[in-house]
Amino acid sequence: MTRTLHDHADLDLPALLDVAVEEALTGLAEGGIPIGAALFAADGTLLGRGHNRRVQDDDPSAHGETDAFRAAGRQRDYGSTIMVTTLSPCWYCSGLIKQFGIGTVVIGEHTSFYGGEDWLRDNAVDVIVLDDQRCIDMMSTYIEANPAVWNEDIGRTVDEDAAEGRS
């Protein structure tokens, strides 16, 4: 069954996003990329939280969503869970969401990066974008100050940026 925003009318989605923002700020304070995430049960119970640790752990697979997913531990059923993330999930994290059947993704922003949202929607995942200004400001500031690290995170090369007139 596909869940809709109406199914979450009793939840304070911005408050759930606050947990992911706290994680993003923790990652930034550790010298990493400020992307945070949290996995919640349908009733809003926090199952796990995490942040991008690629830089800190020298681990290219340590994205915010994967960190939160790992922290949540095994669940019998992910269909009613809600992944809340400060930034649109990349293809890697979108694959994780689809693979385990996470029913809903709440995204802080997709201005700085637009990941696999359309693909997730096409695969019956309820995607809700909050357009949170804190998330937009945090990522745009980080990307401007750390373009090489950011490009590495999203799998872009310096050559690709140069070809598009960016540096």
Image (cartoon, helix red, strand yellow):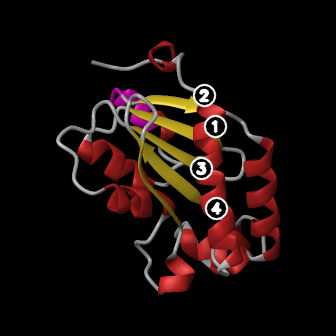
Task: Answer whether residue 18 is visible to the viewer in this image.
Answer: yes
Q: What residue appears at the point 51 percent right and 75 percent down from the top-left corner?
A: 53
Q: How far apart are marks 3 and 1 (CA)?
A: 7 Å
The boundaries of the magenta stretch are 119-124
In this figure, which residue is indicated by the disc labeled 4? 24
- Please identify the quadrant where the N terminus is shown: top left
Question: Which is nearer the N-term, disc 2 or disc 4?
Answer: 2
Q: Is residue 68 above or below residue 157?
A: above
Residue type of the residue flagged with mark 1: Ala
Q: Where is residue 84 in the image (x, y as percent from the top left)?
A: 52, 43
Q: Distance between the residues labelled 2 and 1?
A: 5 Å
The reply to whether discs 3 and 1 touch (Cβ–Cβ < 8 Å) is yes
Q: Is residue 83 above or below residue 128?
A: below
Residue type of the residue flagged with mark 2: Asp
In this figure, which residue is indicated by the disc labeled 1? 15
Residue type of the residue flagged with mark 3: Val
In this figure, which residue is indicated by the disc labeled 3? 19
Q: Is the magenta stretch mostly helix, strand or loop?
A: helix
In this figure, which residue is indicated by the disc labeled 2? 12
